[in-house]
Structures are given as structure tokens and as C-alpha cells.
Image (spheres, grey):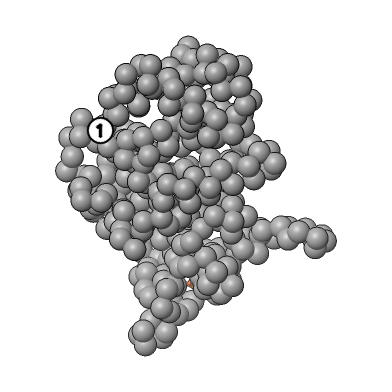
Amino acid sequence: MTNVLQVDHLSTYFYTESGTVKAVDDVSFRVREGETVCIVGESGCGKSITALSIMGLVEEPAGKVVGGDIQFQQDQLLGMSKNELRTLRGNEMAMIFQEPMSSLNPVLTIGQQIIEPLVVHQKLSKKAARLKAIELIELVGIARAEQIYDSYPHELSGGMLQRIMIAIAISCNPKLLIADEPTTALDVTIQAQILDLLRELKDRTKMSIMLITHDLGVVAEMADYVIVMYAGKIVEEGEVVELFNNPKHPYTQGLLRSKPILNQRQEELYSIPGQVPNPLALTESCYFHDRCGHCMSICQTKQPPLQQIADKQQVACWLYEEAMQHV
Ligand code: SF4
């Protein structure tokens, strides 16, 4: 499978009055054709900023991509002008955001918002774009498509709005769809329907999906490959079955332990002790050391590198130092 997206040593910093926040710090990964890569981690671990960096949507001057390369198909994204990026966005790569209500324009009809990328990127006439928009509304499973076309966002439910966001995102047949917590604001039934829809669209169009979530249930259902981020860094990555069956990093193990298990009575749900470190006070230590039950003296002074420990699994943890040397 060829790579659709290749991210190498990406670093994105934010400059605050109190100091520099390394929101994404030396992150590398790839997304291959037709593959779903899930990025997981707690809030503030850098998942969404990674996505915004790829889309060229980090707001400067507060934030800045300070290093690395992002290759999308044949193009290097970081050297591109704003116009060139705008041409790619919504066309060959698209993004679905967490809150559809705040992403859609409340004073424009649903139809006006769906036809915009079709007119701008695909150069369709308004009449042809309208027909295509109605087709897309039907495709994402909404009945009475013509009526919905003329509706305003406030007239639709959260689940319908998220489907409309998906319709806009896939309107130009993107090669890469980035979905940032696309089901967080929805109840479980609608969440399952949206995930089914994304899977079905992926199978039909062969697009690649980069899915950002903190929900391991979503990861288990959707992912081919999983990347676990903590405090701006990748701490573990691997194929979904391997990572769920044999998590190596204590943070991944904690995340999986804190997931409720269906039909099993649990007196109390496990939660990882402690808090994510203050991003303004990071040291040379392993960032997870003061929450880790396996912490050793080296962990407090030296950050473990991300290293391959098995055929398709990488981890950044000193517990596997020996395994790293033998790969
Ligand atoms: Fe825990 Fe040390 Fe591994 Fe960090 S490097 S996760 S502190 S064992």
C-alpha cells in the first residue's frame, strides 16, 4: 500500500506569556492508502494540534509549526502558500470537527454549505452542485434530502448535523479524511451509525482516515493502526490487534484498563492516577514518570526514545530497553 500521508519529526509550539508549550514534539507517522489510523490519548496530548498542523490550520502567531515535514501524496505541505493549501483542503484532504453546530454557518442553508466546495474545487455549476448535494445528503443517510437542503443548521439534530459535516467533507472525494472526535457529542446509537457510515464510505471510496479520539471503543471498531500520544509525543504505536492484546507502554496499559467492559460488573472504574504534566514545566524525564507504577531512576532523568520492539510495534519506555537493542 502506498503512503497517502507521511509526517516526519513534526513539532508545533505555542508561545504564551508564561512560556513555550511544545504541543506536538517530534512526531512521525504515516497513513497508507485505504487505511484507518487512530490517534488516541487524553485531552491536551497533542492529537488535535497534529491534525491542525497537517491541515495548515494552526493559528499564527500564537502557534507555529516549527519543524518537520508533512508529505501528502506528492506534495510537501509545509512549504505551500496559503492559496495552495486552500486548494487541497476540502478537496483532496478534508476534516470533520467535533462540534458540527460551531463548524457550520448558522445563517447559510445546509445546501449552500454543501455546494460551496463543489463549486469552488470541482467547478460545478450551481445546478449540478445542487443535484450532487442532494445525492450526498441521501448518501449520508438523511431522508427528505431536498427539504434538508433548504434547512438551516438550527433546524437539524446533532446526529443529522454530523452527517452533514461528513457530506461536506466527502463531497470532493478526498484521499484523506481527518476526523477529530467526530462522535463525541452524540449519543451511543447515533455514534454507532456515524462510525458505520464512515466505514462504509471508506470501503466504497478507498479513502484513508485519520481518526482522532479518546474513546478506545471507537478505536477498536475503526482502527487498522493505532498511535498513542502523551504530552505531545508518541509513546506507543502498532497494529490494532497487537496493541489491544499486548499493550507495552504503562500509559497504554492504563488507558485500556480504564475502559468499561460490557457484561462485567466493576465496583469502580480504574483511572490512571495523577494528572497530565504541566506543558510549561516539562523536563528531560519520561513525561509519564510521576504517574507510572514502574518508574525507575533513569525514567526521572532521561526521556526514552520511540523504538521498535516488535515487527509492527514501537514504544517509548525504558522497560523495553533490552528488547530495543535486539530488534
Ligand atoms: Fe514508566 Fe519509566 Fe516507562 Fe516512563 S520510561 S513509562 S516512567 S517505566
Residue drawn 20% across and 51% down? 74
Q: Which of the pair 193/233 is nearer the observer?
A: 193
Dot 1 falls on a residue whose secondary structure is helix
Q: Residues within 10 Å of mark 1 (few under 14, many from 20)?
A: some
User: In the displayed structure, would residue 260 be above or below residue 195?
Assistant: below
Say which amino acid is labelled 1. Answer: Thr
The residue drawn where x is 25% and y is 33% is 87
Answer with the quarter of the image where residue 267 lies. Answer: bottom right
Q: 256 left or right of 90?
A: right
Q: Quadrant of the N terminus?
A: bottom left
Q: Residue furthest top?
A: 107
- Residue 32 visible at all: yes
Using the rendered view, name the quadrant where residue 322 is placed: bottom left
Q: Residue visible at 48% across and 30% down?
A: 136
From the top left corner, tell me how far across and down residue 157 is, in percent.
Answer: 63, 25
The C terminus, quarter of image = bottom left
Q: Nearer the viewer, residue 110 or 271?
A: 110
Q: Residue at x 73, y 60 (%)?
A: 261
- Residue 220, given in percent of the width and then of the height, sits at 59, 59
* Residue 327 relative to residue 228: left or right: left
**Residue 214: image x %, image y %?**
55, 50
In the rendered image, residue 124, in percent from the top left (x then y), is placed at: 31, 23
Residue 17 shows in the view: no
Label 1 belongs to which residue? 87
Residue nearest the observer in this picture, 191 or 272: 191
